[in-house]
C-alpha cells in the first residue's frame, strides 16, 4: 500500500492529524494497533484548552464539545481548609477551558474519518519505521495476521509513549530528558453529580486531591458525573482502595471550614496512573515527525498532555500543507524547534503545578512552607495569578503567539 502520510497511532494526535490532512486533500493512512472499542473507551484526559477547542471546531469536530462539553471560566484551589477561586477568564482576557473527555474527542474524530476520510486500520500494529532519512520512508506493520508494508512520503509517529516510531531516530541523534515522580494518581469515575460546579485542586498534608467531572455525554442531557483523583504512592493497587475509603479520603483532603460533605455515589471505575515527565529531542528525523505522547509526557496535574498533542499536529499539518502549496520547507524544517518551545513551557507549568500541589514524602518543613508561600502568592497577587491562569488555559500554538 502507498500513501502520502503514514500516521502511526489513532489517539487524539493521529486522529486529529488525519482529519486536518483530509480537509486539505492530503492522503494519509492511519495504523492503529488496538480495536475501535478500546480506543474509544480509554479513560484519559478531560480538559481541553481554549486553543484545542478552537482547533477542533476549525476541523469540524467541535459540535458535540459545544453541545455537551462544559465551558469553565475558573478553578478552585484549596489549602489550609480555605477556598480560593482563580478567575481564569478575567485574568486572561476571556480564555476558558472545556470539560470534554478525550474519549468523546476520539469517538467523533474516528466517526469523521470513517465517514469522509482515508483508511483507518484498526488491529494494525506498526513494527518499525524504516528509511525515515530518505525520500521513501515506509512503515512495516502487521494486520490480519499478515506482515504488510506502507510506502509513504512522510511518517507521523503518533503512537504514544509505548509506540515504535521513536526508535527510528538514531540514538546518536537523540537526547531524552526524564523525571519520575514519587507519587501516582488514583483516578476514579463515580456515578454522582460533582460536588462543585468547577474543578477543585486541593493541597493537603495527607496528599493531593482533584475534584473534576465528565459531562453526561452521549447526548443524554443528564447531569455531569464525577471524575476524581487522589495522590497515592507509586505502584498502588487500585483494588486496594474500597469505595468508602476513597470517599472518606477525598473528603479529608478537600474539607474546608464550613464546607459541605461530598455527594457520594457508586464508583464505576478506578485506575492508578504513574507520574512521568519526559521529552524526546528532536521531534523530527528526516521524513519522520513525532507528535503527542510519542515525543513528550507530562504529569496530568496541569491537564496538558492531550493539549500538547493537538498543538503538535496542528503545527505539522500547517507545515505539510505549506510545503505542498509553495514548496517552502521552512515549516517542516522548523517543526521540531517550534513544537519543543511550547512543549518545554508545558513541561515547566506541569512540573511546577505538580510540585506545588502534591505532598512530597521526603519534603522538609521548610519545603512545605515554601509551597504554602507560592500558593499564597498565586491566590493573593494578580501578576502571579495571571501567570498561572495563562499557563492553565493554554500556551499558544507555535507561530500563533
Ligand atoms: P495516545 O497514547 O493517546 O495514542 C497513541 C495510539 O497509538 C494509541 O491508540 C495506541 O494504541 C497506538 N499505538 C501504540 N503503539 C502502536 C503501534 N506499534 N502501532 C500502531 N498503533 C500503536 N492528559 C491530560 O491532559 N489529562 C489527564 O487527566 C490525563 N490522564 C491520563 C491518564 C493515563 C492513564 C494516561 C496514559 C495518559 C493521560 N493523559 C492525560 C495524557 C493523555 O491524554 C495523552 O496526552 C494523550 O492520550 C496523547 O495523545 P496521543 O499522543 O495521541 O497518544
Ligand atoms: C480530568 O478531568 O481528567 C482532569 C482534569 C484536570 C486535570 C487533570 C485531569 O488537571
Image: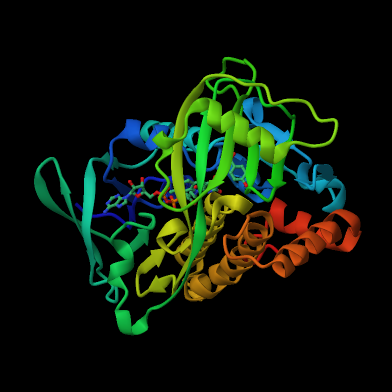
Is 171 drawn above or below residue 401 in the view shown?
Answer: below
Residue furthest out toward the left:
146
Residue 64 appears in view: no
Q: Is residue 113 left or right of residue 137?
A: right
Q: For residue 374, what is the image quadrant? A: bottom right
Name the spot of residue 7 as percent of width and height, x first: 34, 53
Q: Is residue 263 left or right of residue 18?
A: right
Q: Residue at x 16, y 49 (%)?
A: 142
Color scheme of the displayed model: rainbow
Q: Nearer the viewer, residue 395 or 215?
A: 215
Q: Residue at x 39, y 31 (%)?
A: 115
Is 156 drawn above or below residue 81 in the view shown?
Answer: below
Q: Nearer the viewer, residue 10 or 117?
A: 10
Residue furthest out toward the front:
365
Name the spot of residue 29 as percent of width and height, x first: 31, 49
Name the spot of residue 268 as percent of width and height, x first: 47, 24
Q: Quadrant of the C terminus?
A: bottom right
Q: Residue at x 22, y 49 (%)?
A: 125
Q: Nearer the viewer, residue 126 or 347?
A: 347
Is 61 drawn above or below residue 355 in the view shown?
Answer: above
Q: Is residue 163 left or right of residue 126?
A: right
Residue 177 appears in view: yes
Name the spot of residue 253 as percent of width and height, x first: 68, 40
Amino acid at each position: 500500500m502507498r500513501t502520502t502520510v503514514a500516521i502511526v497511532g489513532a489517539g487524539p494526535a493521529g486522529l486529529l492529524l488525519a482529519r486536518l490532512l483530509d480537509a486539505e486533500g492530503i492522503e494519509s493512512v492511519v495504523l492503529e494497533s488496538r480495536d475501535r472499542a478500546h480506543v474509544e473507551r480509554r479513560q484519559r484526559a478531560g480538559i481541553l484548552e481554549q486553543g484545542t477547542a478552537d482547533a477542533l471546531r476549525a476541523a469540524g469536530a467541535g459540535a458535540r464539545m459545544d453541545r455537551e462539553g462544559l465551558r469553565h471560566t475558573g478553578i478552585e484551589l484549596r489549602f489550609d481548609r480555605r477556598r480560593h477561586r482563580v478567575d481564569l477568564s478575567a485574568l486572561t482576557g476571556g480564555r476558558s477551558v472545556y470539560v470534554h473527555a478525550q474519549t468523546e474527542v476520539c469517538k467523533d474524530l474516528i466517526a469523521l474519518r470513517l465517514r469522509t476520510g482515508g483508511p483507518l486500520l484498526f488491529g494494525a500494529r506498526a513494527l518499525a519505521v524504516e528509511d525515515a532519512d530518505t525520500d521513501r520512508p515506509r512503515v512495516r506493520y502487521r494486520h490480519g495476521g499478515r506482515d504488510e508494508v506502507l510506502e509513504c512520503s512522510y511518517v507521523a509517529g503518533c503512537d504514544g509513549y509505548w509506540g515504535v516510531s521513536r526508535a527510528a531516530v538514531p540514538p546518536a541523534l537523540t537526547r531524552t530528558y526524564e523525571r519520575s515522580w514519587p507519587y501516582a494518581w488514583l483516578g476514579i469515575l463515580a456515578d454522582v453529580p460533582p460536588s462543585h460546579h468547577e474543578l477543585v485542586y486541593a493541597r493537603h498534608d495527607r496528599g493531593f486531591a482533584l475534584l473534576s467531572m465528565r459531562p453526561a455525554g452521549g447526548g443524554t442531557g443528564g447531569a455531569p458525573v464525577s471524575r476524581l483523583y487522589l495522590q497515592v504512592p507509586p505502584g498502588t493497587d487500585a483494588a486496594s482502595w474500597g469505595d468508602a475509603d476513597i470517599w472518606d479520603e477525598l473528603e479529608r483532603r478537600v474539607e474546608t471550614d464550613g464546607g459541605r460533605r461530598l455527594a457520594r455515589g457508586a464508583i464505576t471505575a478506578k485506575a492508578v496512573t504513574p507520574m512521568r515527565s519526559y521529552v524526546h529531542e528532536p521531534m523530527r528525523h528526516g521524513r519522520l515527525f513525532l507528535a503527542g505522547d510519542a515525543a513528550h509526557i507530562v504529569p496530568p496535574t496541569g491537564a496538558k498532555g492531550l493539549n500538547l498533542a493537538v498543538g503538535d499536529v496542528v503545527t505539522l499539518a500547517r507545515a505539510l500543507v505549506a510545503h505542498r502549496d509553495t514548496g517552502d520547507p521552512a515549516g517542516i524544517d522548523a517543526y521540531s524547534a517550534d513544537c519543543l518551545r511550547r512543549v518545554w513551557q508545558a513541561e515547566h507549568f506541569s512540573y511546577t503545578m505538580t510540585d506545588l500541589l502534591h505532598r512530597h514524602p521526603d519534603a522538609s518543613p521548610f519545603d512545605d512552607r515554601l509551597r504554602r508561600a507560592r500558593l499564597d502568592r498565586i491566590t493573593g497577587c494578580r501578576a502571579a495569578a495571571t501567570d498561572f491562569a495563562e499557563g492553565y488555559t493554554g500556551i499558544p500554538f507555535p507561530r500563533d503567539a
